[in-house]
Amino acid sequence: MKTVKVILGILFSFLVLNACSDDDTVDNNDIIGIWKVSCTEGYYKGNYIPVDGLEIQYTFLKGGTGTSEILFNSGSMQSENVDTQHSITWKINGNKLIIIQEGKSTEYIQTEKNSDYTKYNTYQAFDTYYIYVFRKTK
């Protein structure tokens, strides 16, 4: 019985120490490049909010600078057009990507990452958030 308790204690310790891994952080080098970003869902007090947002293209450069562009006709048969382009600064803080554009800071909290995309949530208030999908193009 004592052996079983020791083995369970070791197993529990291993699980606790490995539960918080580095997968929950955003890597500065991983974010460098061009990303197409779309807002896919919104929620207010747990209820779905329809989202009809334009796709944005972020270019993240080394040193924490870059650009954002609003894209028209993205994903359609027509040629893609850029409406506006703005300079941005960005930084990584744990699992948060913080983008500052025209003096306004937006905090994206990473919720999912795989080889095709990364999902982030942005919170407008305690009970209101939006889900953004970032897809790397280059």
Image (cartoon, rainbow, N blue to C red):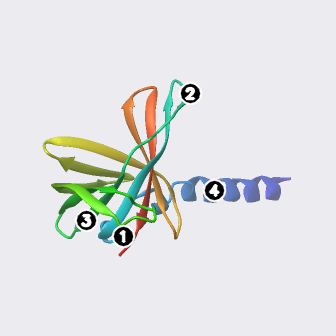
> Does 9 sit above or below residue 106?
below
- Looking at the picture, does residue 77 appear above or below residue 107? below
Q: CA distance from mark 2 to mark 1?
A: 32 Å
Are dots 4 and 2 in contact, CB under 8 Å?
no
Q: Residues within 10 Å of mark 2 (few under 14, many from 20)?
A: few
Q: In the displayed structure, does residue 27 sit left or right of residue 47? A: left
* Residue 30, label in figure: 1
Along the polypeptide, which appears first: circle 1 or circle 3?
Answer: 1
* Marks 1 and 3, how far apart at CA: 10 Å
Closer to the eye: label 2 or 1:
2
Q: Which mark is residue 46?
A: 2
Secondary structure at badge 4 equals: helix
Horizontal and vertical percent for residue 80? 34, 64
Q: Tag 4: residue type?
A: Leu
Amino acid carrying mark 3 in the image: Phe
| Residue named by callout 3 | 60
Q: Earlier in the sequence, mark 4 or mark 2?
A: 4
Chain-order first, disc 2 or disc 1: 1
Point 31% across, 60% down: residue: 57
Q: Would residue 112 appear left or right of 121 to someone viewing this image?
A: right
Q: Earlier in the sequence, mark 3 or mark 4?
A: 4
Chain-order first, disc 3 or disc 2: 2
Q: As rendered, which of 83 and 120 lies closer to the eye?
A: 83
